[in-house]
Amino acid sequence: MSATTAATPAAAAAPVPKAQFDWRPLALLAALMGLALPAIGTPSTWVTLTVAGLAMGMIIFVIASGLTLVFGLMDVLNFGHGVFIALGAFVATSVMGGMTVWAGESTAAQLASVFSAMLVAMAVAGAVGWAFERVIVRPVYGLHLKQILITMGGMIVGEEIIKVIWGPIQIPLPLPSSLTGSWQLGEASVEKYRLMAAAIGALVFVALALTLSRTKVGLLIRAGVQDREMVESLGYRIRRLFVGVFVAGSALAGLGGVMWGLYQQNVTPQIGGQVNVLIFIVIIIGGLGSTLGCFVGALLVGLMANYTGFLAPKVALFSNIALMVAVLLWRPQGLYPVTNR
């Protein structure tokens, strides 16, 4: 009895082992880049394609991060996410178009017009997202099939409203002269806008990761997902936090719409619906609701699109679907599955 009694406190005092970080998805990312080098042949071309692919992946991540956030923390399948992407892109055409004369040839003024367009697009998309949540999403919480149907209907209505405001035709969204052109790294060429897009994507990822893991708001939201009644019994209004999450996800979609519109240099009312397929491929690859998985999945998709577009243009049309199938055969729940999914 005494030996058993003495062993119990020691066992209780033993530290709880921490979960090991899974490096294998990151190794997959490195392996893709490594395998592409001998296939491409020229190191300078490989650097150009790799930087372009990573930048494209960052843009895709910003677009998809809002949907990942909403599904991961609210369990809402928002198929109307594309309307916020399109709205952000069209707001950018109005803001940047109105600031063209003021910006002139000044680099600082041109960058100010781009960032102003991004901020206004985020604000407008967030405000519309607040109304979207109250009118369309709130009545169908917990009902996934109804969420899919009603949010798809909301996106169709939203696209028609955009056509009424901005018209049904394609509108140009050219890059300002300060963001056109490339920098030379030896024999490799790196586009200025892609570097800026990569920096914005990295900033969004760091901000999301720190907010969800290191702040009280992130802790309350994650706790509310696990046990809403318990958190509400402590005096916190989880519904308000969830509305804030939906607004933040919509604002990120608006930011992504601006970045994608500048990447394409034109926008159409259907731009959100066209990107939706790519978004869902990314979040399925990464693991439904996982921010880190969305980030790694977006980089994989961006690199795959650039490599296959250079090596085999005909294969590029379905390369991302092939990538998704390969990842799901390896990990059916995605690269970083969320445990409660």
Image (cartoon, rainbow, N blue to C red):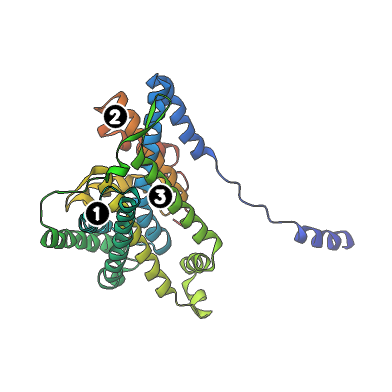
The answer to whether residue 285 is seen in the rendering is no
Which of 112/34 is in front?
A: 112
Amino acid carrying label 2: it is Gly
Amino acid carrying label 1: it is Ala
Mark 2 vs mark 3: which is more N-terminal?
Answer: 3
Mark 1 vs mark 2: which is more N-terminal?
Answer: 1
**Residue 220 x, y percent position in the rendering:** 51, 69
For numbered disc 2, what is the local secondary structure? helix
Mark 3 vs mark 1: which is more N-terminal?
Answer: 1
Which of label 2 and label 3 is nearer to you? 3
Residue at the spot 46% in from the left edge and 27% down from the top edge: 34
Decide: few, some or many residues near mark 1? Use Cα within 10 Å; few <14, some 14-19, many ≥20: many
Amino acid carrying label 3: it is Ile
Q: Can you identify the residue that label 2 sits on?
A: 309
Which of label 1 and label 2 is nearer to you? 1
Q: Can you identify the residue that label 3 sits on?
A: 200
- The quadrant in which residue 74 appears is bottom left
Residue at the spot 28% in from the left edge and 65% down from the top edge: 124
Residue at the spot 31% in from the left edge and 33% down from the top edge: 319
Q: Can you identify the residue that label 1 sits on?
A: 89
